[in-house]
Amino acid sequence: MFAKKVTESKKWLENKLKNSSDVKNDSISTTNFKVSVMYISSICKSDTIYQYIINPAFKTDTLSDYETYLRSFPGCTEPKDNQEALDKMLTGSVVIFLKSKLFVFEAKNVQSGYVSDANVEISILGPQDALVEKLSTNINLIRHRYHSERLSIENKIIGKLSQTNVAIAYDQSIADDSVITDVKKKLSEIDVDILQSAGQLHQLLTNKKWSLFPTLLITERPDRIVKNISEGKVVIIFETSPFALIIPSVFFDFFSSMDDIYQLPGVGRFLSFLRYMGVFIATLLPGFYVAVASYNPEIFRVQLALSIAGSRATVPYPSYLEILFMLFMMEFLIEASIRLPKTVGSAATTVGGLILGQAATEAGLVSNIMIIIVAAVAIANFVIPINAMGFAIRVVKYPILLISTLFGLTGLAISFIGLVLYLANQRSFGTSYFRFFEIDKPPNKKNKESTTS
Amino acid sequence: MGINRYLYYLIFLNMIINVVVLVPNILINDRFNGALMAMLVSIPISLTLIYFFGKAIARFPGMGLPEILKDHLPKWGHHSTLFLFGVMWYLIGLIPLLVFVSIIKDYINQDNDRLLIISVLLILLVFCCRLNSKTLLYGMEVLLVINVPLVLFLIAKLLINKEMNWDAILEIGTHFFGIPSLQSIAAATFMFTGYTNMVIFQRIFEGKFKFKHIWMIGVLGLLFLLTSFFIPIGYQGTDGVANYMLPWLVTADSIRIEFFVVERVLYLFIFVYISIGLIGTIIFWHIALDLLKNIFPEKSRDKSSWAILILFSAVAMTLEIFLNEYDRYDFTSAWLIVRLFGELLLVLIMSYAARKKALK
């Protein structure tokens, strides 16, 4: 009778975790008896399992001896019911099925030793861990923040030569089925030799030649991944890259930092307001400056128009050249300080800062106000928390500048409308990318079930 | 709010862009002969039309006008109706476009040629009105959310300004009892016609739109009518207001924001109206394009839509060359009357089709 109960429990557990590829289900047969163990390999220490569970099995003679041996461990208990066994398993325990009993044996593996701090997406009050370049560690980081049997992790191998291990993680009960099947289909269709980074996979998944804005969010923060999984999104984690892809993502995701949640609500709102201000400044200000200075100085109040004209008095060329010159200097400076080795980097910024700050104005090549504008554009661009979006915004100001140079304020208005519609036309795995209110989300699985039943 | 908000956005869009479709000009021309009465009369007319249209279209969830007509009208009737309405929607978009060209020429880009200005606008329109219907609704939402607070700010600023002459408004109020002309009724009903855009947008979101709170549309429409009629009168006087081709621009230019970088309200006004008006034109032409290309057989639709867009641009440019501002005014007021009857016809056809479907 007890034996039957044990096999039932085993089946129940298997069924609950059937979508997770990191669940191990082994049986140990010694000459005298047979036991089987079940555990989630990504959060258990395999050494512990070999040393304290598998090895002793071969050293004991009878099943009852083995049972007494197991009972002697403080971390080994008999679960009340199946649910408790499952919960323990999800927090890093091994379930041991004896003939008529089952035990849970704690073999937790918390990886903290070689997990480094986040250095691309920095948070002040949030957790500091970042993903690493090892898939099992990454899954471990996620599992330790999401203790639920609904989290399923499936493995895939992409890249003919690189054979990169990729895991798809999602919450079975709330993730959208159509997105999951779509992601799996697209992943299996990918034909590439080497896959090394999340950004590369983003391109392979979206498959657009001239896309400018990222439509899938790339992140290195396990807390952001877990938050998105709990909102029903699908996450792709890599073996060789410390970044994960979140599918689908919308425009506004790229402007939320995890600190918005960790800070008090008033502060969080203010921070996200700052970012949207930053986007407006970073995209429109250069175009606006050229349109106003060259076409319609009358729209400013007189004092301001005069002071702009006064500061431009020594500049020998039209305003668009002036701003292009400064913007390119700024871009060079940013690029140089990113790519240079850290020891040389400080030299580059000093030299660049000198030229941009003082010498160019004194030589009469650019106006003082121009410097302020370029600085404002650069700083406003840095406010965007997700790097990929920051780069997109960096690029997008140039087309706007070009159209504004040609057609003045009309050009600015037209390019703004064009930009809004371009963004509204993007889709991220079937989800509308750019919409102001997200009240009418597509019904996810949970809602669907409740409405059909 | 849900999905239904897009329906209200479409209605709201028409109420805001009335200024650039010369509705206030026509009403102001009739200010001593029943313009106020025309506004009052327009509300029951429009609300009845909305009611019947809403009832009829609810029978066709997820279907646009071309599909509805195809099922319920003979082929010649189907094609000629699509053509008629296609041209109508094209003209709804064309009038603000022509008005914008003259605003831009007069106030922003004085050095540029009119044809250059209209070509730039046309490039944007041609590329954007081929976009997906959902995209346009999302884009419209963003532009409205950015601009409507500015519109409300401008109206509030105009209303609380000391220069506003309330006596002039009261004076016009004494001319309340008059027999309204057809022209001013047609102009006033334009405010409420945003709902007709559903002939295409009904397709998306599986037709989950519902025509609810119709009285609210009436109240809002009346408020917008009153502001867009009375504010220019309050600033330019009962007689002076008729001297301007675009009384609202002069009105916007008569106030200042003393403590802001852009001092002249006029420029803020132009910007707000260019972005709202252009998205309006894009939406109207999107509908016109969709209606017209459905006349052609399914295979050649992609090619024919380009041909239609080239034709759209060519006609717009020709009209820009040949119409002066007076012609444009006459053209608009004649077109608004045709539009009123077109709207009646549309509601009749829709009710007919709905009835036919119900009997089946």
Image (cartoon, coloured by chain):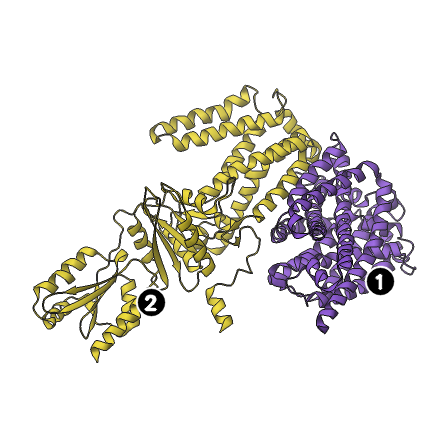
Crowding at dot 1, Cα within 10 Å, few <14 / some 14-19 / many 20+, comes out as some
Chain ID of residue with mark 1: B
Crowding at dot 2, Cα within 10 Å, few <14 / some 14-19 / many 20+, comes out as some
**B272 and A201: which is toward the camera:** A201
Q: Is residue A166 visible?
A: yes
The circle drawn on residue A16 is 2
Label 2: which secondary element: helix
Left of A412 or right of it: where is A10? left
Name the residue: 44% across, 42% down.
A387
Find residue A207 and report its horizontal and vertical position in percent: 48, 44
Name the residue: 63% across, 34% down.
A403
**A388 and A187: which is toward the camera:** A187
Q: Nearer the viewer, mark 2 or mark 1?
A: 2
Left of B52 or right of it: where is A136? left
Find residue A216 and report its horizontal and vertical position in percent: 46, 48
The quadrant where residue A417 appears: top right
Which chain gets the yellow colouring? A
